[in-house]
Amino acid sequence: RPGEAYPYAPAVAAHLAELVEARGAKPSTGFVGTAYLLPVLTRFGHHELAYRTLNTREYPSLGYMIENGATTIWERWDSDKLGPDMNSRNHFCFGAMAQWMYEDLVGIKPDPEATGFRRVLLTPGPVGDLTFAEFTYTTPQGDIDIHWEVADAVLHYAVTLPPNVPAELWLPTADAKTIVAEGDHADATRSARKPDRETALGTCAVFELSAGTHRLRTRAKVSHSELAPAK
């Protein structure tokens, strides 16, 4: 749990969030810190801030690069303003922010107790004005397909797991009583439910899923009408 081993970690993360907000929700990190910025914000309950930091188009940001014609990731946030010395236009370090998109937005991580994605942790993270996410990851055992969508204040979640790849799903919900399992595996999905867990992002319904396609819906924690679109 956040802060359990390091009791001052939540306070440090809160200070980090204040610094990011003070900079207009834009990254000001370098090669080392960029990879940790968004995951730490999400881990300690600042998921919406992490999303705004990734999604901004203002300098400095990945969006700024795109707005200024980049088709690859620059070595520097302001490579467009600098000369050719030590200024690569194809330098992945800032692209480490994509890890957050896989692990905390789409929500897929390898179980640290297993190898080669033989067991996975599913932690979808709907946020802000984002209405859906879709992702396929090819493992040695087969493809894992994930799709979630928020519509009319309802979160719809679907995952397909290949044979011999179990998963633990932590589904965020505004009301655990509204969770409904759907599809051909609905009975198996319902029977796979474990006790709910409280996280830094709120209540999550927990399921131990086996191979196959699982579909669920629940009242969404994110209300798009209450959030201004990210800029």
Image (cartoon, helix red, strand yellow):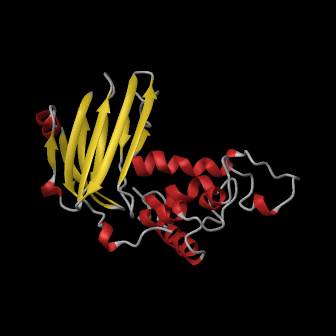
Q: Is residue 25 left or right of residue 177?
A: right
Residue at coordinates 43% horizontally, 41% vertically from top-left? 109
| Along the viewing direction, whichever of 117 and 151 lies nearer the viewer | 151
Residue reaching furthest to the front? 69
Q: Position of residue 163 (x, y in %)?
A: 31, 22
Q: How many marks?
A: 0
Mark yes or no: residue 126 visible: yes
Q: Residue at x 29, y 55 (%)?
A: 150
Q: Place residue 165 in its image quadrant.
A: top left
* Residue 47 percent location from the top left of the image: 43, 62
> Residue 95: image x %, image y %?
62, 49
Q: Nearer the viewer, residue 80 or 86?
A: 80
Measuring 42% from the left and 59% from the top, which residue is drawn there? 2
- Look at the picture and state if 188 lies above or below 8: above
User: Which residue is depicted at the point 14% across and 56% down?
Assistant: 178
Seen in the picture, residue 99 relative to 160 is either above or below; the reply is below
Asked if one can make out residue 210 in the rendered structure from this viewpoint, the answer is no
- Where is the N terminus found, in terms of image quarters? bottom left
Percent coordinates x, y for residue 179 in the rendering: 16, 51
Along the line of sight, which residue is nearer the eye, 27 or 46?
27
86 left or right, relative to 202: right
